[in-house]
Amino acid sequence: MRITVRYPVLRGRLVLRTAGDWERDVEPLEATDEGAVFEVPTSSQTVTFKPCLVRDGAFFWSQGADYTLGRFDPDAEVWPFFFAEERGRVSDVMRFERDGQAHAVRVYLPPGYDENHLRTFPVLYMQDGRNLFMPEEAFGGREWRVDETMDRLDRMYAVRKVIVVGVAPIERMRDYTRPGYGPYGDFLVGTVKPAIDRAFRTRPGPADTVVMGSSLGGVVSLQLAWQHPDVFGNAACLSSTFGYEDDLFERIEREPKRAIRLYLDSGWPRDNFDATNAMRDLLVYRGFRLGDDLLSWSFPEGSHNEDSWAHRLHLPFQFFFGRAWAASRARG
């Protein structure tokens, strides 16, 4: 099995250690100052290994859990780090002004972001930014635990690493409903996203840009993807109040289908269950395919609150950023 390790080797060299013999170095077939390629023999369906760095007589194991890849993984490529913490970090508040008022924005950067500067990242833009990372900022002290969930999925090697941008509204009812969600979307597209793309190592195309929210934040997320599919190629809408102060049902019914991927969910019985199912059915009627460019879930006893959204957050993360989904799409 061929494995590519991407890392800026300023000094020293990369080797692999594998579960076949954790004491023996596997030397690369080829190496550059940006990484190395290894050939690992295997008689099983998986290979478990760790990239290691040999530098100035010292030996460093990569941080985090062991990597385990399947023999038929179409993307046997890893981006290790050796000296940074195993947790991502959340930035200080950044402020973006609109009409004389400022949106507060925090950015989550994944583990190893600062050390392994070769890697670029998809970006997730999330609504209700104060509720995502810190209980002291969140409504009722309950937050989505976005950074903890991303870190855990990364340790599982279940998702690609992702930059998360949490944008707080100025006036939630204005920003997330018609007609105010039009100017809010223009602000994200014209001001926030270009600034994020300049400041961080992003993958700026629509296929690698996701927008996500819950309740009215789910409504505006679908509005953003539908209105700007060339910017936001994916949207996740949790417990969304579709049909309340928006025109999405009418637009989706009469306008051309967009080349976007969508995730919908709701709790049952009183978590916008009927509105979410109606939107799902309309999207299927318009040509979206369940399990391909549309995923929809219903959660018995799911509630309309941050704890419930935090509990199921891993599902849209895996749909948009999961290695299994990426592999299935790569195979066509």
Image: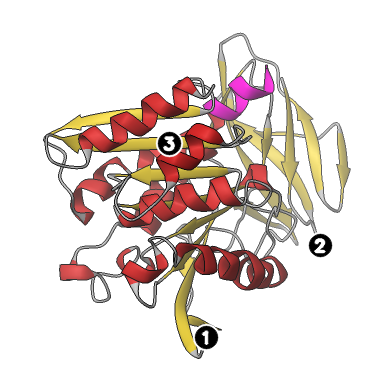
The residue wearing badge 2 is 10
Tag 1: amino acid: Asp
Q: Give the residue drawn at x 15%, y 69%.
A: 140
Q: Position of residue 22 (x, y in %)?
A: 57, 32
Q: Which residue is mark 1?
A: 99
Q: Is residue 119 visible to us here?
A: yes
As measured in the structure, the alpha-carbon distance from the residue carrying label 2 to the one carrying label 1 is 46 Å
Q: Which residues are magenta?
A: 324-332
Q: Is mark 2 in CB contact (under 8 Å) with mark 3?
A: no
Q: Is residue 25 left or right of residue 243?
A: right
Q: Which residue is mark 3?
A: 263
Position of residue 306 in the picture relative to residue 32 (left or right) = left
**Sequence order check: which comes first, mark 2 or mark 1?**
2
Which quadrant, please, contains the C terminus?
top right
Labels 3 and 1 touching (C-beta < 8 A): no
* Among numbered discs 2 and 3, the one appearing first in the sequence: 2
For residue 317, above or below residue 11: above
Q: Main secondary structure of the magenta part?
A: helix
- Residue 165 location (% of width, % of height): 50, 64
Q: Secondary structure at mark 3?
A: strand
Residue for point 43% across, 36% down: 263
- Determine crowd level at label 3: few under 14, some 14-19, many 20+ residues with C-alpha closer than 10 A: many
Mark 3 vs 1, N-terminal side = 1
At 38% from the left and 51% from the top, the residue drawn is 219
Q: What's the amino acid at mark 3?
A: Tyr
Foreground pick, 89 / 169 = 169
Tell me how far mark 3 sits from mark 1, CA to CA. Answer: 32 Å
